[in-house]
Image (tube, rainbow, N blue to C red):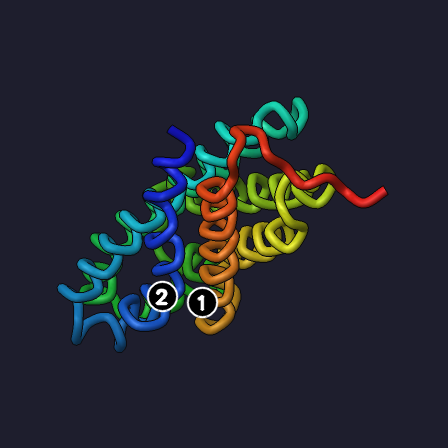
Amino acid sequence: MARVLAGVSILPALFLPFYEAFLHGGRRAVEINPRAAAYMTAHMIGAYCTILAGFGLIAIYLHYHERIGRIAPLSLILALLGQLSYAGLLFIDGFFNPLFAHFDPALQTQFHSPDFFQAVTQSTLLQSFGIALYTPFLMSLLCIVGYVLLGAIILLKRFLPWPIGVLFLAGGIILGIDLMVPMWVEITGYAAEGVAVAWSALLILRSKTPTTFIRSAA
């Protein structure tokens, strides 16, 4: 099962940075409105690729669970939940953001920028959503915690090559704060996550035993 999940995750994971670079488009209303339908379709593609890439996280747990300690299942569960939450955000963003960009372009642009809190204080409509408005931030925090913990465990336990741990760390942090960084940095985050998942999956496919791992240097 681990090998099947690993094999399924490789291409979607590697496609994520290309989705962000060539399909996603800009964040501002002026960039979204001319291609609203394409924007929605691109986000659906990105969401499905994110979900399929998450299969690689399940494969990591199934293949290495006997070697990664007691806290590892928690880190993998948090990382997987963060992955699924991010996919959910892409679904929501792909549907509602074009509508938001059409009816209130200025507020949409501000809302999808580091000036998020200022946009909320200036909009009665946004304030009407209450605590639900901050759900994306909780999901982003989940993504950061899950991937940082997973990356740290990989660096400590060395059941995977240490660069994979660094990639998970970097990708989780960048994607967790994606609205606060330029698009090219967000693309780098997708690339880091995608390479980490695909590299792990390839190692699982190539391994001859179900619990092959890399020992840390003494």
> Looking at the picture, how far across and down is residue 132, in whole percent?
38, 39
Asked whether residue 128 appears in the rendered view, the answer is: no
**At x 81% / y 45%, what residue is drawn?**
217
Q: Amino acid at mark 2?
A: Glu
Residue annotated with mark 2: 20
Q: Which of the pair 198/141 is nearer the observer? A: 198
> Looking at the picture, how far across and down is residue 145, in whole percent?
59, 41
User: Which element is circle 1 on?
Assistant: helix
Q: Residue furthest right?
A: 218
Compared to residue 92, the image places residue 186 above or below, namely below
Asked whether residue 24 appears in the rendered view, the answer is: yes
Q: Distance between the Cα atoms at labels 2 and 1?
A: 6 Å
- Name the image quarter holding residue 70: top right
Residue annotated with mark 1: 187
> Looking at the picture, how far across and down is residue 194, in whole percent?
45, 55
Q: Kindly indicate whether the residue at mark 1 contacts the one at mark 2 (C-beta within 8 angstroms).
A: yes
User: Dividing the image into 4 quarters, which one contains the C terminus?
Assistant: top right
Compared to residue 149, the image places residue 72 above or below, namely above
Report the side of 49 relative to 152 (left or right).
left
Q: Amino acid at mark 1?
A: Ile
Q: Residues within 10 Å of mark 2 (few under 14, many from 20)?
A: many
Q: Which of the pair 3/181 is nearer the observer? A: 3
- Name the image quarter holding residue 102: bottom left
**At x 24% / y 66%, what residue is drawn?**
101
Q: Earlier in the sequence, mark 2 or mark 1?
A: 2
Report the side of 7 relative to 173 (left or right).
left
**At x 24% / y 55%, what residue is drawn?**
45
Q: Residues within 10 Å of mark 1 (few under 14, many from 20)?
A: many
